[in-house]
Image: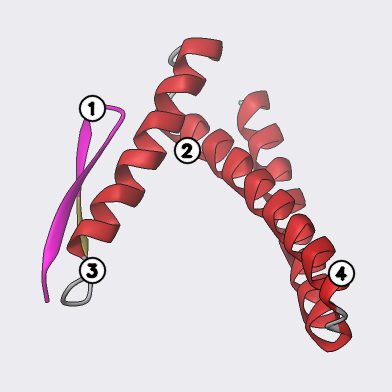
Amino acid sequence: MPQVTVQINSRGYQIACDDGQEAHLARLGNYIDNRVRELIAAVGQVGDARLLVMVSLLLADELSDAYAELKVARTNDGAAARLDREENLTVALESVAQRIETIAESLERT
């Protein structure tokens, strides 16, 4: 099984992946690292755990927005069954985002 070293906040992480997924995983790692850098520019170095929680929240927010846009696009196509599934996914994603926010809040208190 191939492994890719992903650099996030100047730290290397060895991540295993399926054959042929190395470049995709590297792109994802670069995207996360860029988001971490943007966050550091805004709030400073607040610790790896807190940064990763905050970036996770930002990415969950982006994903939620993308699902909402997809929902609107599919509504225009009249795909009601797919919308129900996506709405359930959006609700689940919002629940995960809320749990992440709770974790971030508890980290901020420590």
Residue position marked by numbered label 4 in the rendering:
76
Whether residues under marks 2 and 4 lie with C-beta atoms below 8 angstroms apart, the answer is: no
Taking the magenta stretch, the answer to whether it contains residue 82 is no
Q: Residue at x 83, y 83 (%)?
A: 79
Mark 1 is surrounded, within 10 Å at the Cα level, by few (under 14), some (14 to 19) or many (20 or more) other residues, namely few
Task: Give the CA distance from mark 2 to mark 4.
Answer: 36 Å
Disc 4 element = helix
Whether residues under marks 4 and 1 lie with C-beta atoms below 8 angstroms apart, the answer is: no
Please provide the residue range marked out in magenta.
Answer: 1-13
| N-term-proximal mark, 4 vs 3 | 3
Image depth: mark 1 or mark 3 in front: 3
Whether residues under marks 3 and 2 lie with C-beta atoms below 8 angstroms apart, the answer is: no
Taking the magenta stretch, the answer to whether it contains residue 12 is yes
> Nearest the camera: 79 or 59?
79
- Image quarter in which the N terminus is found: bottom left
Q: Is residue 100 left or right of residue 44?
A: right
Residue 10 numbered tag? 1
Residue 102's spot in the image, x, y percent? 73, 43
